[in-house]
Image: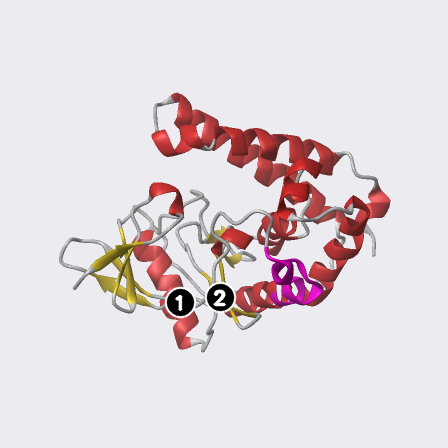
Amino acid sequence: MTEQRLAGGLGFGAVRVGDEVRRPVQPWTANAHAVLRHLEDAGFDGAPRARGFDEQGRERLTFLPGETLGETWPWPAWLRTDEALRQVGAWLRRLHDATATFRPAADAVWFTGRAWEPGLLMAHLDASPWNAVWADGELVGFVDWDTVSPSRREDDLAFSALTWVPLLTAELAGNAGFDEATDRHRRFHLLLDAYGYDGDRIAIRDAIAGRVERNVAVIRQMAAGGEPTSQGMLPWAAFLERSGAEVAGLPDEFWRP
């Protein structure tokens, strides 16, 4: 069957074969599949289905049909709407509630290296605009589950808030089509309201700072080791670092509804 190379993915080798996606296996792939099978058993319809491995040893996932952002700048107007933001928040809540009962094997390996412990759930951790699939204005789900790992709810909400509100630098937000920085407060709380978050929202600020610090460190470490994809991401790491500094400087009032 003909293979069609999929756009995006930062060169990780994803191809479409019929109604499936095939991708190279990583040390955590089998455990990510266990999460996806748990979601399938729970009736969660916002994720691809794990279908094992092909004759080349690649993972097999069902293809989510729809429209993706890709490298479109600015973002389409419909992707910047309040309704799109509400759907993202609601999707995250459904995911977290569905994975709160997942219990991985004691020796399970995850992308983040964090072991599961009581009180954690399984988070996507990269539910960003670039991994979302849409059809007729409705969120179909998110792809790229390599990053799924044991986590707190706040850590997943942090990266989605950073990229969807967005809380990125004014330059990046402007390139995406967001001209009013003053609207960030309203959109941030709209996202958390759609999720139904009832904790102290300053915790999201702290989670964003931690996530940015970890992402930047990993990208730079791998780039220094000669990894070409990470070397290409160095400008993104710089943007992330500046975004994290701006988020850290927001007053406490920003994080309160």
SS class, disc 1: loop
Q: Is residue 146 left or right of residue 209?
A: left
Q: Quadrant of the C terminus?
A: bottom right
Q: How is the image coloured?
A: secondary structure
Residue type at tag 2: Gly
SS class, disc 2: strand
Residue drawn 46% across the image and 33% down it:
233
Residue type at tag 1: Leu
Magenta range is 76-87
Q: Residues within 10 Å of mark 2 (few under 14, many from 20)?
A: many
Check disc 2 and report the residue beneath it: 141
* Res. 36 image quadrant: bottom left
Residue drawn 35% across the image and 48% down it:
109
- Residue 61 in the image: above or below residue 6: below
Q: Residues within 10 Å of mark 1 (few under 14, many from 20)?
A: many
Residue drawn 64% across the image and 44% down it:
207
Main secondary structure type of the part rendered in magenta: helix
Residue 201, given in percent of the width and then of the height, sits at 75, 52
Residue 64 - label: 1
Indicate yes or no whether the magenta region holds residue 78.
Answer: yes
Q: Quadrant of the N terminus?
A: bottom left
